Image (cartoon, helix red, strand yellow):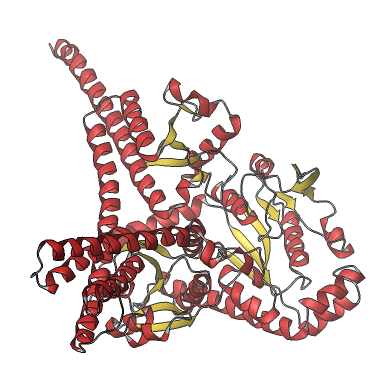
């Protein structure tokens, strides 16, 4: 039997991974289940062993907690000075990332991977500092506790009753080259607390009363052991594949999790991440945009949930449609999804009866896919929730309800005028006037104003046009059937009108995105010369995003500078220019609205071409927080790719023209030589 022929795409991707692995530094994490198990001690012991073998070692940051054993292991090793950051009248000592990059030791020791940096430094989190060190080719030793893993955050909170705020994405943990589990029986750990070997006595007592209790430690220890075992299983599978085993680990599992602006979505995302990890399956986080207007708080929660899913390793996607369940199931079928994860929260029972709930819709149309229903629980500060009847969306809705009442009154006036002008006109024609008003209200202002218009239409028709007039009493019982049918039809018309309006809004948004892409591509396609390309791009993006735009291109020395003199205001601030330089060198978004240098005034997007970044696009929006919207970010990245390809195309055309001229100039000389 012949062996299966390797696929070219797989071979190319494997070659790329090997190339990146050679260039990238190695990360070793000393992993434990709680403070005091000996992670830092074990890390320093391994460090001293490497130093004794002649390896260049630098202690970038170590938290000794005044423990004599730890301080003794630090003696004789080179220590990198801290970076002092002023903050609110005090000076905070942080890890000096730039100093470490300049020193470039063989191994750099950076304790406490989950640490949150002080405001004003380059990255918001220390794990981001470590990622930059690894990209620079520096090997890193670090420490981490299991409660700081993002996917386990809700489980730790449920076990201990304490919400851990400092977390690390599981992708940063999974990408580690080596994990060393540092374990200690919980009873011995508590004994160390009692003896004052971990914290000073009053801190130890407070910690043992709240977090460091025996049941908590036993559960955390199990989590750490399971998480380490999961990683070992992944390594075994990788080793089997590298050995060329003919029997593959057969799995085609793929998960799809529904993400929304609800505060309960965070727990659903973490459950999906754990499920995907257990199944060793890829997973997708999907948000279905129904066209509903979201408040500022809801948009912020949605962005936060999508960013968290992406950090946990999910592929994020935004879908558009009126029915969330239908869109999810349809997309799941196109991506060969085998398991769908959705959240279930409290909702009116009538939605379940009518089949209008997300859970009911997904279960009904899921087909062969398995459906996992997760009970959502809210996280964080409850006071941060918008006050129900006072938030902006409700205020707008009240105004729309008043407009609905006014339009219904206008319909009553039109119907009365019709009866006065045409006394023998059928009542059906007057009812049609009300239906017309309901359609207008629903399409223009939404579902609930349309429902109100439907109810008011029935009441006003009864009050003004059914005998006895100007009362709600009805002498002919047949009118009850008329009212019932009229109300049902009016509500259905209201719902359909709302859907038409929402679809029109989504179509306008998609049309705008398409129009921006089309206009930019057309302007770039008909333009030659880098300076002219930059001018056209800055003009188009400035108008489309209501922002001050600047494109930075690298000099011969690799330093960025504005391509046009008009954008010199960007480079006047050295800090902003440094953010742009970082985005260029690392090929990642940075600046306002991101987790990298978020204090910057502008968002910097690398112009990534086919051969790598060719420059950086900087946007300083007039409206703060504009680029926190995932749709805006995706559109912006697509536009940046177009600009990069246009610049590459122009440079290649110029290079081809130069080579052609050189070849033509060389021809007479060749003929003379041959003669």
> Which residue sits at x=58%, y=68%?
150
Q: Position of residue 274 (x, y in %)?
A: 51, 76
Q: Tag count in the figure?
A: 0
The quadrant in which residue 188 appears is bottom right
Towards the viewer: 70 or 668? 70
Is residue 104 found left or right of 500 in the rendered image? Answer: right
Corner quadrant of residue 101: top right
Q: Is residue 223 above or below residue 18?
A: below
Residue at left 20%, top 86%? Answer: 481
Establish if 458 lies above or below 88: below
Q: Image quadrant for the C terminus?
A: top left
Quarter of the image that includes the N terminus: bottom left
355 and 327: which is toward the camera: 355
Q: Would residue 271 be seen by someone viewing this image from the given angle?
A: yes
Left or right relative to 165: residue 364: left
| Residue 231 in the image, given as x and y percentages of width and height | 54, 74
Q: Nearer the viewer, residue 493 or 507?
A: 493
Residue 207 in picture, x, y percent from top left: 81, 73
Residue closest to the eye, 464 or 327: 464
**Residue 249 seen in this snapshot:** no
Check the image and report above or below for 376 versus 569.
Answer: below
Query: Please, is residue 242 above or below residue 590 in the view?
Result: below
Q: Residue 284 in the image: x percent, y percent?
A: 39, 68
């Amino acid at each position: 039997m012949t062996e299966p022929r390797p696929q070219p795409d797989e071979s190319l991707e494997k070659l790329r991974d090997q190339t990146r692995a050679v260039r990238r530094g190695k990360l070793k994490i000393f992993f434990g289940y709680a403070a005091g198990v000996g992670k830092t001690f074990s890390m320093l012991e391994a460090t001293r062993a490497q130093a004794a073998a002649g390896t260049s070692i630098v202690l970038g940051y170590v938290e000794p907690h005044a423990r004599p054993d730890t301080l003794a292991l630090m003696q004789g090793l080179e220590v990198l000075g801290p970076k002092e950051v002023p903050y609110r009248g005090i000076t905070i000592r942080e890890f000096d990332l730039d100093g470490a990059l300049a020193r470039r030791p063989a191994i750099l020791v950076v304790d406490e991977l989950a640490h949150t940096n002080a405001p004003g430094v380059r990255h918001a989190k220390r794990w981001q500092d470590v990622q930059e060190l690894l990209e620079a080719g520096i090997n890193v030793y670090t420490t981490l506790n299991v409660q700081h893993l993002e996917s386990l955050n809700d489980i730790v909170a449920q076990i201990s009753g304490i919400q851990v705020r400092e977390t690390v994405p599981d992708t940063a943990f999974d990408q580690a080259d080596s994990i060393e589990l540092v374990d200690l029986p919980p009873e011995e750990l508590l004994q160390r607390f009692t003896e004052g070997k971990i914290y000073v006595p009053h801190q130890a007592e407070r910690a043992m009363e709240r977090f460091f209790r025996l049941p908590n430690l036993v559960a955390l220890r199990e989590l750490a052991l399971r998480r380490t075992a999961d990683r070992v299983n992944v390594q075994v599978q990788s080793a089997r594949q590298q050995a060329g085993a003919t029997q593959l680990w057969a799995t085609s599992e793929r998960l799809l999790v529904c993400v929304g602006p609800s505060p309960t979505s965070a727990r659903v995302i973490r459950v999906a991440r754990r499920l995907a990890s257990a199944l060793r399956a890829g997973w997708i986080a999907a948000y279905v945009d129904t066209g509903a207007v979201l408040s500022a708080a809801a948009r912020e929660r949605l962005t936060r949930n999508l960013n968290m899913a992406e950090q946990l390793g999910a592929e994020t996607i935004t879908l558009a449609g009126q029915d969330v369940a239908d869109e999810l199931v349809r997309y799941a079928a196109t991506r060969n999804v085998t398991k769908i994860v959705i959240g279930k929260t409290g909702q009116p029972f009538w939605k379940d009866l009518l089949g209008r709930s997300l859970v009911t819709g997904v279960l009904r149309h899921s087909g062969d896919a398995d459906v996992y229903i997760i009970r959502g629980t809210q996280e964080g500060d409850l006071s941060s929730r918008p006050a129900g009847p006072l938030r902006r969306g409700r205020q707008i809705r009240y105004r729309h309800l008043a407009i609905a009442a006014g339009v219904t009154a206008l319909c009553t006036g039109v119907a009365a005028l019709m009866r006065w002008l045409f006394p023998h006109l059928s009542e059906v024609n007057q009812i049609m006037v009300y239906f017309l008003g309901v359609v207008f209200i629903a399409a223009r202002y939404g579902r609930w104003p349309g429902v109100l218009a439907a109810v008011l239409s029935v009441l006003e028709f009864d009050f003004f046009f059914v005998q006895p007039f100007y009362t709600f009493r009805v002498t002919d019982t047949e009118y009850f059937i008329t009212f019932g049918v009229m109300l049902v039809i009016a509500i259905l018309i209201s719902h359909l009108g709302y859907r038409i309006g929402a679809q029109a809004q989504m179509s306008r948004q998609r049309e705008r995105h398409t129009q921006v892409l089309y206009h930019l591509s057309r302007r770039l396609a008909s333009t030659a010369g880098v300076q002219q390309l930059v001018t056209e791009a800055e003009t188009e993006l400035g108008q489309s995003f209501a922002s001050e735009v600047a494109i930075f291109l690298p000099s011969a020395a690799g330093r960025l500078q504005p391509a046009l003199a008009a954008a010199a205001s960007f480079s006047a601030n050295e800090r902003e220019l440094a953010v742009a330089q970082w985005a260029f060198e690392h090929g990642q978004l940075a600046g306002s609205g991101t987790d990298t240098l978020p204090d910057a005034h502008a968002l910097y997007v690398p112009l990534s071409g086919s051969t790598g970044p060719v420059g950086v696009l900087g946007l300083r929006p007039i409206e703060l927080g504009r680029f926190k919207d995932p749709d805006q970010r995706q559109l912006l990245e697509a536009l940046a790719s177009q600009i990069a390809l246009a610049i590459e195309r122009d440079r290649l055309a110029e290079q081809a023209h130069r080579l052609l001229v050189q070849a033509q100039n060389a021809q007479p000389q060749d003929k003379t030589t041959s003669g």
